[in-house]
Amino acid sequence: MGCTLCGWTDRHAATIVEINKSGKRIGVQGDKATRIDSNGMSESQSYSYERQPNSAISYFSLRKNGMWKQVKSSYGCLVIGIRDEYYDYSF
């Protein structure tokens, strides 16, 4: 299933590849996102996605507040069911 890792303002497409028995911990691999528009450094961005089965697996756990957070990291959160990529050129 597709998912999106949300950082500060950037988003990165990924795929869920592992789920533990309780369903409260998942493994995620980053996808290859290829820009397919011609909009340059704009907010309007379109991508195609490819699985990267040999990429590293990052683990996320379901928190009490309902958010998926990366294990041993305070960086961003995970949105399940939507695969999205976005690069914020303003930084």
Image (cartoon, rainbow, N blue to C red):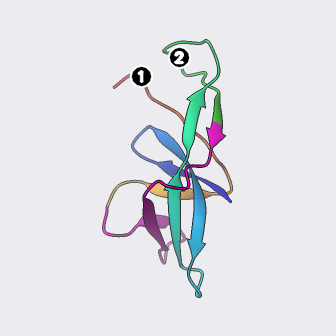
Q: Could you say whether the residue bearing mark 1 is in a helix, strand or loop?
A: loop
Q: Is residue 71 magenta?
A: yes
Callout 2 amino acid: Ser
Of residues 9 and 11, the one nearer the viewer is 11
Q: Earlier in the sequence, mark 1 or mark 2?
A: 2
Res 10 label: none
Secondary structure of the residue carrying numbered label 2: loop
Left or right? Give the position of 53 relative to 90.
right
Q: Residue at x 43, y 63 (%)?
A: 58
Q: Quadrant of the C terminus?
A: top left
Q: Which residues are magenta?
A: 49-73
Q: CA distance from mark 1 to mark 2?
A: 7 Å
Judged from this view, the residue extending furthest toward the front is: 54
Contact check, label 1 and label 2, Cβ < 8 Å: yes
As shown in the figure, which amino acid type bears the numbered disc 1? Tyr
Residue at the location (63% across, 42% down)?
A: 50
Please report the residue visible at 44 percent of the width from the left and 28 percent of the height from the top. 88
Q: Position of residue 21 (x, y in %)?
A: 59, 87
Q: Is-magenta flag for residue 82?
A: no
Which residue position is annotated with label 2?
Answer: 42
Q: Which residue is mark 1?
A: 89
Give left or right: position of 45 versus 27: right
**Crowd rating for badge 2 (residues with CA inside 10 Å; few <14, some 14–19, many 20+):** few
Q: Is residue 82 left or right of residue 54?
A: right
Percent coordinates x, y for residue 41 in the rendering: 48, 15
